[in-house]
Image (tube, rainbow, N blue to C red):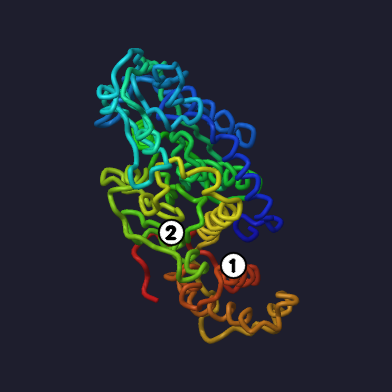
Amino acid sequence: MKAALAQEPLELGALGEQMYTLVAELFPTCRSITGDGLRATLRSLQQFIPVILREVPSGTRVFDWTVPAEWNIRDAFVKNAQGERVIDFRKSNLHVVNYSVAIHQKMSLEQLKPHLFTLPERPDWIPYHTSYYKKTWGFCLTHNQLNALPEGQYEVHIDSSLEDGHLTYGELYLPGETGEEILISTHSCHPSLANDNLSGVAITCFLAKHISQVPHRYSYRFLFVPGTIGAITWLSLNESTVSRIKHGLVIAGVGDAGPLSYKKSRRGNAEVDRAAMYVLRQYGPETNVMEFSPRGYDERQYCSPGFNLPVGRISRSPHGTFPEYHTSADNLEFVSAIALGDSFSACLSIFSILEGNATYLNTNPKCEPQLGERGLYRTMGGLSKDSTTELALLWVLNLSDGDHTLLDIAERSQISFEGIHRAALLLRDHGLLKQVRNSYHGVNPRL
């Protein structure tokens, strides 16, 4: 097999621009954990990948939760005495508290104010608020807008529906050489928030497109789910088959200018954790590795004790650590094509390591074999003058004792995983190695 997920070198600049274009296309849509906006978003992805829309009826019991009623919104506003829209859903879908129930009545400013939400410390930004599991209504606006509202009567109108329907999520399964799976999950429920999480939706979509076009050993399952309830629903419906998941990654908040961050799985030493940490080290010391916490995105569902799946999370600036989080400042100017391309490359590098990682046994372990007469150095072609190439062969031979994976060898030798992987394939092809298993599934071996 060729190097994992190999094909022609990727043009990350152009790819980043394509992902940014998709983020911009999806940005105006009002999404929620259910409803037509979520469906429209998932259908937009079908121009790139054959994602399947799954519908789960409202009222379905999923572990300790119940699939909620479906929410849809058509319009919303607050009008002053002159009939002017002083708060207008058409200008920003963040203006309405997500999942607000319908209302149409007149009231005083005093009556209205308990239903208005602002950010006094960021007076020009609109906050993002939700009320998924409590029937209420509300509007979000800038603090400057609130301060400009005079006393008087206001017409309040939210044209929404909350009724039995479905929860919708997107799923794409790409079979590989083995039925063992890599799970890639991203939340797709937020309205006009570019980094959180249209960036994750775009990168997950383009990862699926790329992996579908190249050979891959693992099977891949891509999930585009509404946050929390979507992952819970999927796990409830697929409980009997989750044992196939050998590695997993939640992708969220990957379009901003911050350094790459990785949150470990609950296990802490899963192979995906080690692969991700290895990749982040290649980006430099400014990257951030976090221990597992039961707060965060959907990794906390996949890592709940009843499943304890090896699922970590990749982000840039972690949620809640930047002021733009869950505000109107998380807009198209907050994300960039460069950051999207960079995050895509990091994710693909993690999967490439998981694809290529294996444990080998040296078939000629007593002293070094004669590599020159086997033509191994010449096989490396123009790289034969590079001492690290020869060193990779020697490291692989020395540590291929049935206990060390290629990732172990790359970490200890400080030679790139790609170089170690290539050396292993050459040695295997010349009969000096035999593969004993695809990867190491226990505690970290002694190095």
User: Residue extending furthest top?
Assistant: 105
Mark 2: amino acid: Ser
Instruction: Give the number of the disc on residue 261.
Output: 2
**Residue 95 image position (x, y, % from top left):** 42, 30
Q: On the rendered image, what quadrant is the C terminus found in?
A: bottom left
Vertical position of residue 367 compared to residue 46: above or below: below
Residue at the (65%, 82%) spot, across then down: 371
Q: In the structure shown, which secondary structural element does the residue marked by tag 2 occupy?
A: strand
Query: Quadrant location of residue 328?
Result: top left
Residue at the (48%, 31%) spot, across then down: 92
On the image, numbered disc 1 is attached to which residue?
A: 418
> What distance separates the C-alpha of mark 1 from that of mark 2?
22 Å
Vertical position of residue 219 compared to residue 56: above or below: below
Q: In the image, is 279 to the left or to the right of 113?
A: right
Q: In the image, is 23 to the left or to the right of 236?
A: right
In depth, the one of 47 and 92 nearer the eye is 92
Mark positioned earlier in the residue sequence (1 or 2): 2
**Residue 128 image position (x, y, % from top left):** 38, 37
Instruction: Give the number of the disc on residue 27.
Output: none
In depth, the one of 125 and 301 nearer the eye is 125
**Residue 410 image position (x, y, % from top left):** 51, 72
In depth, the one of 110 and 352 nearer the eye is 110
Mark 1: amino acid: Glu
Residues tagged 1 and 2 counted as in contact (Cβ below 8 A): no
Q: Is residue 156 visible?
A: yes
Residue at the (46%, 60%) spot, across then down: 276
